[in-house]
Amino acid sequence: MSEIQCDQYNPPEDPDLRAESWCEHLAPVFEAEVARDADLSAPMALKTYHLGEVLLGAVSAPAQRLKRSARTIARQGIDHILLQFYTAGQSRVQGTAGEAEIKASQIVVFDLSQPVISEAGAVCATNIMVPRKLLADQIGTIENLHGRALDFRAHPVRQLSYTYLAGLTASADSAEAHQLRYLSGAAADLCAACFQPDANQAPAVDQLNKIAVCQYIEQELAQVSLGVDALIAQFGLSRATLYRLFDADGGVASYIRERRLLRAMKLLGASGGRPRISTVAYATGFSDEKTFSRAFRRRFGFLPREAVAESLIPRAGNGSPQILLDWMKSLSA
């Protein structure tokens, strides 16, 4: 018998209750609203396996509107990437960088630390949720792919990744706990392989330099002195090279500020009590609380103290444990 933990949506027999129960089940990931014309007699399924380092599963969803707001992000304090490999249906995703159409045979990337809205028809997909830290060692800036679509059927490595993930989902019930670290490690590595540059894209040396710089930035976010000059001194790169590496991110300073604010959001939403705003400000490299609060509000639309209040709101639901949210938080441990 499998020792792999599994969470599964079980639709109520009463069709009138299905939309509400579906939205409640999705609540840890998205604020969902089932479309008025959705066919609720069609199969509705969400099955998720906890593989230790990643969450993997499959979904058959009705037409719906999905939203992940800054307040939800603040309440949860997680920092994961959700990948959906569409096998049927389509959606329109509005992320921070613009809008994208997602169709069957495409991957959509959700950076769960960033707000997003998805208007979707009935969709079937294979899902995997991966902590950012498992991808950041191999991808320069996965957050730039938020809301974007990438074909996988015509791309050999992405097709291989989908085949593995779909196969693993189908056979997870027969897997055993001692196999988890191998299965989840392979899943995370294949996901990272999906986003490696093609031969005609940025030179490999640029890719490697950017990964190294981004890793250093993550380690040094608490340092007020972290900036262009510090990075030049650390890596021996020219100013022009450094600027080129982060051109797609709006510049080096913009990237550092974004990572600081997203780290702050995670700290403000972390469990374990009410964090002091000043402590979070200094822990993320801001020189004072006022500057931090101003930057935070400009980025997210509300103040850090409001994010703290959001993190203390009791979890919604009918009193039953929200397994998905607990699992999402466990990936951060």
Image (cartoon, rainbow, N blue to C red):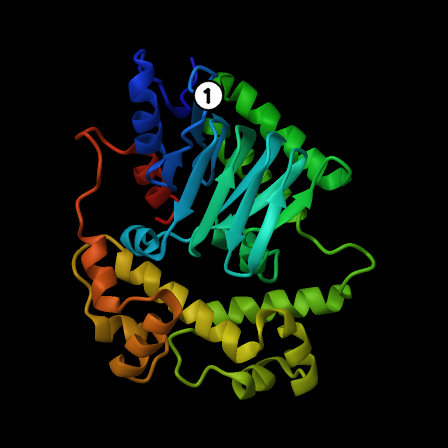
Q: In this view, does 230 lie to the left or right of 107?
A: left
Instruction: Identify which residue is drawn at 55% across, 20% down.
Output: 170
Whether 255 is drawn above or below 28: the answer is: below
- Residue 93 in view: yes
Residue indicated by mark 1: 39
Whether 223 is drawn above or below 156: the answer is: below
Residue farthest along the front direction in this orientation: 37
Q: Quadrant of residue 283?
A: bottom left
**Residue 230: where, in percent of width, then height?**
52, 85
Q: Quadrant of the N terminus?
A: top left
- Residue 282 in view: no
- Viewer-proximal residue among 122 and 232: 122
Instruction: Identify which residue is drawn at 56% across, 81% down.
Output: 231
Instruction: Identify which residue is drawn at 48% across, 74% down.
Output: 256
Q: Is residue 248 left or right of residue 1?
A: right
**Label 1: element kind:** loop
**Three-letter residue code for mark 1:** Asp
**Residue 286: where, in percent of width, then height?**
34, 80
Q: How crowded is mark 1: few (under 14 residues within 10 Å), some or many (20 or more)?
A: some
